Image (cartoon, rainbow, N blue to C red):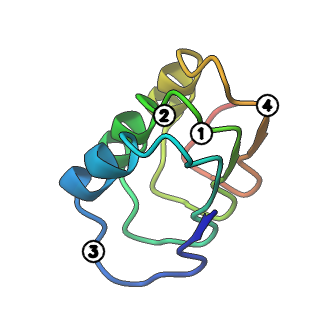
């Protein structure tokens, strides 16, 4: 489990590329991270173990993130509530 709930600092793509390599990574809470980018989440989508992802209130994320998450076969739960830049 990793929680960066309401982390206000920068979230570089390389950080999520490394996270995606962790075989034990199952639950990630990124709720309310204002600097979270589509590219960072797309890097995380490469995970082979991610089951739960909280992106609620990440207002900078777009439909590009949703398209990327479709290729995450292990993902069972996703929260995109109040992601105002997403159309879905």
Disc 2 to disc 4, C-alpha distance: 16 Å
- Where is mark 1, residue-wise? 86
* Sequence-wise first label, 4 or 1: 4
Q: Position of residue 43 (x, y in %)?
A: 33, 38
- The one nearer the camera, 34 or 19, is 19
Residue lying at 39% horizontally and 41% vertically, measured from the top left: 20
- Which comes sooner in the sequence, label 2 or label 3? 3
Position in image of residue 53 (x %, y %): 66, 48
**Is 12 situated above or below 39?**
below
Q: Earlier in the sequence, mark 2 or mark 4?
A: 2
Identify which residue is drawn at 54% across, 46% down. 85
Question: Do the residues under discs 2 and 1 have CB atoms within 8 angstroms?
Answer: yes
Kindly report the distance in space between the C-alpha atoms of the residues bearing marks 2 and 1: 9 Å
Residue 17: image location, x then y, percent: 28, 44
Picture residue at 38% right of the left edge, 51% below the top? 19
- Which residue is labeled 2 in the image? 65
Kind of element beneath mark 1:
loop
- Of 5 and 25, nearer the camera is 25
Q: Which residue is mark 3?
A: 10
Q: Tell me if residue 4 comes above or below residue 24 in the rendering.
A: below
Specify few, some or many for label 1: CA neighbours under 10 Å numbering under 14, 14-19, or 20 or more: some
Determine which of the numbered discs, if any, sits on residue 76 in the image.
4
Give the distance between the C-alpha atoms of the residues marked 4 and 3, in whole angstroms: 27 Å
Q: Nearer the N terminus, badge 4 or badge 3?
A: 3
């Amino acid at each position: 489990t990793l929680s960066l709930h309401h982390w206000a600092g920068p979230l570089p793509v390389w950080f999520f590329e490394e996270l995606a390599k962790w075989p034990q990574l199952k639950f990630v809470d990124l709720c309310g991270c204002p600097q979270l980018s589509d590219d960072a989440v797309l890097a995380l989508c490469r995970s082979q173990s991610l089951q739960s992802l909280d992106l609620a209130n990440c207002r900078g994320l777009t439909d590009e993130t949703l398209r990327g998450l479709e290729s995450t076969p292990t993902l069972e739960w996703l929260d995109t509530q109040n992601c105002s830049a997403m159309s879905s």
